[in-house]
Amino acid sequence: MHVIDLSHITETDMPVFPGDDPTVVNRTHDVRQHGFAQTSIAMSVHAGTHVDVSAHLFEDAPTLDWLGPDNFAGWGAVVDLSGLGSGCIEQSHLAHLGAVESLDFVLLRTGWDRHWGTEQYFADFPTLSGTACRFLGGLELKGVGLDTPSPDPVDSRELPAHNALLNHGLVIVENLCNLDELPNESFIFSCLPLRIRNGEACPVRAVGMTL
């Protein structure tokens, strides 16, 4: 089995969505001085590579402590959208997915992760159209992953793509990376979150596994 890391590194002052609290990783104890190492982390659950579940927008939706591990692992496929630039992801880009068997997660590879750590990362990235979201919602998936900050623009207030995907019960995995190292199909995707009581999101160590 080959395991491919699809997660950005969690560290102090890592990129966060505009307006969110900064991430602080603090080494409170070290081996030389205390005989053991210990670290504390202060961060938003929407920082870094993370998963959103329906409770992010819907009050009565299941939270992370109710959802089982099976919701966050399954067979994946990658859609190569690296030539799209900052355009909109339409249903026509995804139509071939209807013929893919045993599909649980669709990962949208735009190549935007190359801008991680720059101001460009949160500006003019590709987003999902309403028809594309409805199409994905009809595929009976477990989730959709992106190598961008969001399926909606940064300045969106209505969050139509989030609403459409989460309303279909899909999880949304944001800020993925290294999707170019995955095959197009026939790999296992995993994005297991912490079991946070009443949690609506959580950082994950997302991986792709080829057999």
Image (tube, grey):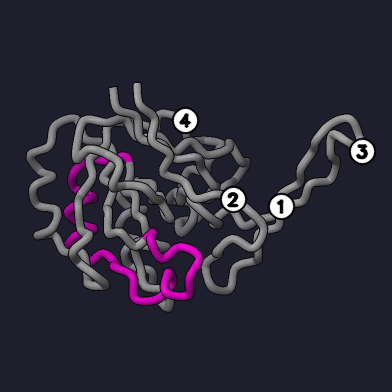
In the rendering, which numbered label is found on residue 25? 1
Q: Residue 68 — which label?
A: 4
- Which circle, 3 or 2, is nearer the viewer? 3
Q: Amino acid at mark 4?
A: Gly
Say few, some or many: other residues with alpha carbon within 10 Å of mark 3 (under 14 / 14 to 19 / 20 or more).
few
Amino acid type at image mark 3: Gln
* Nearest to N terminus: mark 1 or mark 2: 2
Q: In the rendering, at what x and y percent does residue 67 appear?
A: 48, 35
Question: Over which residues does the magenta segment extend?
Answer: 113-142
Q: Relative to residue 197, is residue 119 drawn left or right?
A: left
Residue 209 at x, y percent in the picture: 34, 29
Give the quarter of the image for residue 155: bottom left
Label 1–label 2 contact, CB within 8 A: yes
Q: Crowding near pointer 2: few (<14 within 10 Å), some, many (20+)?
A: some
Whether 109 is among the magenta residues is no
Residue at which label 2 appears? 10
Q: Residue at x 48, y 43 (%)?
A: 62
Q: Disc 2 marks which amino acid? A: Thr
Q: In this view, which residue lies farthest toward the right? A: 33
Return the disc, 1 or 4, that comes first in the chain's sequence: 1
Q: Earlier in the sequence, mark 3 or mark 4?
A: 3
Identify residue for label 3. Answer: 33
Q: Cβ–Cβ below 8 Å for labels 1 and 4?
A: no
Label 3, label 4: how many angstroms apart (C-alpha)? 40 Å
Helix, strand or loop at mark 4: loop
